Image: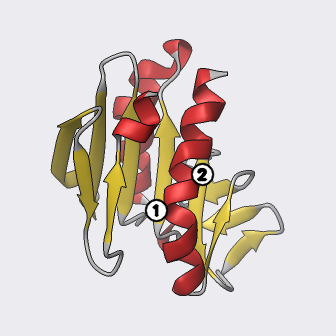
Amino acid sequence: MEHNRIVYQLLLQLLAVVQGQGRQIWNDITLFLGPQRDRYRPDSTVVPAEPKMWAKDHVYGDQVLLVVAVVSASSMTDDHEVKPRQYAAGGVPLCLVVDAFARKVRLLSQPGADGYERETDVALGRPLDLPEPWKLTIDTAALAE
């Protein structure tokens, strides 16, 4: 229940900006990050209005604008290390990791072949600014309620 509540609260904050920029939020899509790479299904994925698709249920990673991972007890290592490294290599520009267990939110940006070059961590409850063109500050306090 906690996991779903966090995703819902985040979607409420993203929705107006996403709609205003002609984007979409998908909650049930697989990322195609390249041949011979694992494929993942983030908790939420923001894509342009008409992203390039690898298959009807797979979107190319470099088409994705933001992925969201809400950490579960069983997925801590995957959500903090494995998936972000793969997302970066696949060209996903932003990865937002919400970890209620550690009481923090991580924004990973500037993807490269070996992972994200930039990481911004804030304590759950503190505001988190998304970079341009988002013009959005995430109220992480709403994710902690």
Q: Residue 57: where, in percent of width, then height? A: 80, 61
Instruction: Quote the CA–CA distance across marks 1 and 2.
Output: 8 Å
Q: Are marks 1 and 2 in contact (CB under 8 Å)?
A: yes
Against 53, residue 144 (above or below) is: above
Q: Residue at x 24, y 49 (%)?
A: 127
Tell me if 89 is positioned left or right of 116 in this view: right
Q: Residue at x 40, y 23 (%)?
A: 100
Residue that badge 1 annotates: 66
Question: Could one spot residue 35 in this view of the protein?
Answer: no
Tell me if 31 is positioned left or right of 62 in this view: right
Tell me if 55 is positioned left or right of 67 in this view: right
- Label 2 crowd bin: few (<14), some (14–19), many (20+), radius 10 Å: many
Residue that badge 2 annotates: 44
Q: Residue 139: where, in percent of width, then height? A: 35, 49
Against 41, residue 24 (above or below) is: below
**Which mark sits nearer the N-terminus, 1 or 2?**
2
Question: Could one spot residue 132 in this view of the protein?
Answer: yes
Q: Residue at x 43, y 20 (%)?
A: 76
Colouring mode (rainbow / by chain / secondary structure / one colour): secondary structure
Task: Give the structural element (helix, strand or loop) at label 2.
Answer: strand
Q: In front here: 108 or 62?
A: 108
Task: Give the structural element (helix, strand or loop) at label 1.
Answer: strand
Q: Residue 51: where, in percent of width, then height? A: 64, 81
* Kind of residue at disc 1: Leu
Q: Residue at x 49, y 75 (%)?
A: 17
* Kind of residue at disc 2: Ser
